[in-house]
Image: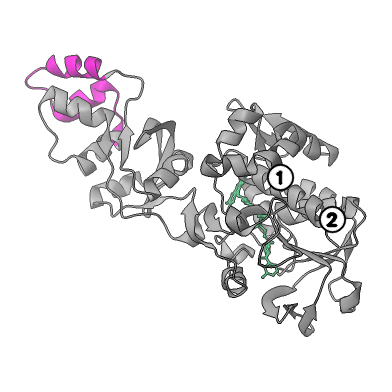
Amino acid sequence: MANADNPPASEDTIDALVIGSGPAGLMAAETLAKAGRRVTIIEGKPSAGRKFLMAGKSGLNLTKDEPLETFARAYGSAADWLYPMIAQLDPVEIMAFAEDLGQPIFTGTTGRVFPKVMKASPLLRAWLRRIDAQMRLRWRWTGFDGDMLAFDTPDGLQTISPNVTVLALGGASWSRLGSDGAWAPWLAQKNVELAPFKPSNMGFRVAWSDHMAPHFGTPLKNIALIAGDMRHRGEAVVSHRGLEGGGIYGVSSAVRDGAPLAFDLLPDRPVEGLISRLRKRPRKQTMTKALTGLGLDGLKRALLQEFARPLPEDPATLAALIKSLPIRHDGPRPLDEAISTAGGVPQAALDKGLMLRAIPGMFVAGEMLDWEAPTGGYLISGCLATGRWAGSHAALYR
Ligand SMILES: Cc1cc2nc3c(=O)[nH]c(=O)nc-3n(C[C@H](O)[C@H](O)[C@H](O)COP(=O)(O)OP(=O)(O)OC[C@H]3O[C@@H](n4cnc5c(N)ncnc54)[C@H](O)[C@@H]3O)c2cc1C
């Protein structure tokens, strides 16, 4: 890729413009270039794909190795909409994509797929080398100037009128990496009706009592998280800010939307067994000893104290609490801390090729679109798939 930090900004040279260099934008750009379009990528930050690189810090979970039908269901209410896009760039293709870029992959026990190097930088470097496009860094899109696109650039304000544009500006979290959601009012001014941003895959605030402080940073292992009808095995981390971690993220959208949160502290033990053990508890045995005897470690006992004080002596009531301990929280952590965001450009604002109905010639891809999915590789996969879909339809736009 030609890296043109300060290229001559001649407006008539821009054919296909992609704004945003995350996985969605890069996939759209590569697809446009392969279709023969002259592509320019604009990125507000001084380097490409910063959030993608951040995803690499936890190993870069690219996709999930599971049948397409199962995979598609992870996109919940957006599954039908996204299905054709996911089907044309499915998990098998995404694995091949990484390997084509010289990144051997491996599949973990849960089906999650990672590059063997467990980071994003080699894949991103190889991909940027391969994409036939010009890149303009430190160019920040600032909205519309009439029908033109306006940019804040190292050389001052520039306006561009490309033949076709793909917006791939990301969601509205981790703004320091570039995805700040600032685009929402600009599209709204052009009569694009947006869904409000909501945090997705996020932690929850809990105002802990002092006795919880020694447990901050400790993972809560071997629990089931319950949110309404949803039951999910996973881990949570107790921190001074509240509860976070993969297990919490897995139920976070249901809890955000109003489902009560509860933990099964002993998910492998049926309630009847716990009741009969508690009934046989010697009279003089302390509650701590009885709970330890059931297999509850210090953190689990502290959580019981936190959310069910005073602990009931009645075996059935206590066992029921161990199996479904209501977790009181003060709502989601702030939007900017979320792994991803829901909301943004809804299906109704787009045609089948992901072009904005209100702005002909402007396509949208990636996390800007109003869909959400759990962690597990579904996010990057969804961004790649919508990027390819928007890119291939944008390539046909003249
Ligand atoms: C800590 C963390 C770990 C994650 N781990 C995983 C994981 O393992 N697996 C997974 O599937 N997902 C993961 N994700 C989520 C994943 O990184 C995102 O869903 C994905 O990067 C979104 O891709 P995108 O291309 O839509 O947008 P982004 O990657 O957010 O890229 C958007 C780009 O647009 C640029 N931009 C924005 N506004 C402007 C503007 N006005 N002008 C110019 N440029 C602009 C931004 O600077 C940015 O480079 C993780 C996220 C975080 C925060």
Residue 321 position in % (x across, y down): 22, 31
> Which circle's residue, 1 or 2, is located before the other in the chain?
1
Q: Residues within 10 Å of mark 1 (few under 14, many from 20)?
A: many
Residue 395 marker: 2
Please tell me which residue lies in front, 292 or 263: 263
Residue drawn 36% across and 33% down? Answer: 229
Residue range corresponding to the magenta coloring: 271-298
User: Does residue 240 appear anywhere in the picture?
Assistant: yes
Q: Residue furthest bottom?
A: 156
Ligand 1, image quadrant it occupies: bottom right
Residue 125 on the magenta segment: no
Where is mark 1, residue-wise?
385
Residue 309 position in % (x across, y down): 15, 41
Are dots 1 and 2 in contact, CB under 8 Å? Answer: no
The majority secondary structure of the magenta stretch comes to: helix
Q: Is residue 350 left or right of residue 283?
A: right
| Residue 281 figure quarter | top left
Residue 249 marker: none
In terms of secondary structure, where does tag 2 sit? loop
Please tell me which residue lies in front, 12 or 252: 12
Please tell me which residue lies in front, 387 or 193: 193
Q: Total label count?
A: 2
Residue 279 on the magenta segment: yes
| Residue 81 figure quarter | top right
User: Does residue 121 appear anywhere in the picture?
Assistant: no
Please tell me which residue lies in front, 319 or 383: 383
Tell me if residue 190 comes above or below residue 226 in the rendering.
Answer: below
Residue drawn 47% across and 55% down? Answer: 199
Residue 192 position in % (x across, y down): 59, 67
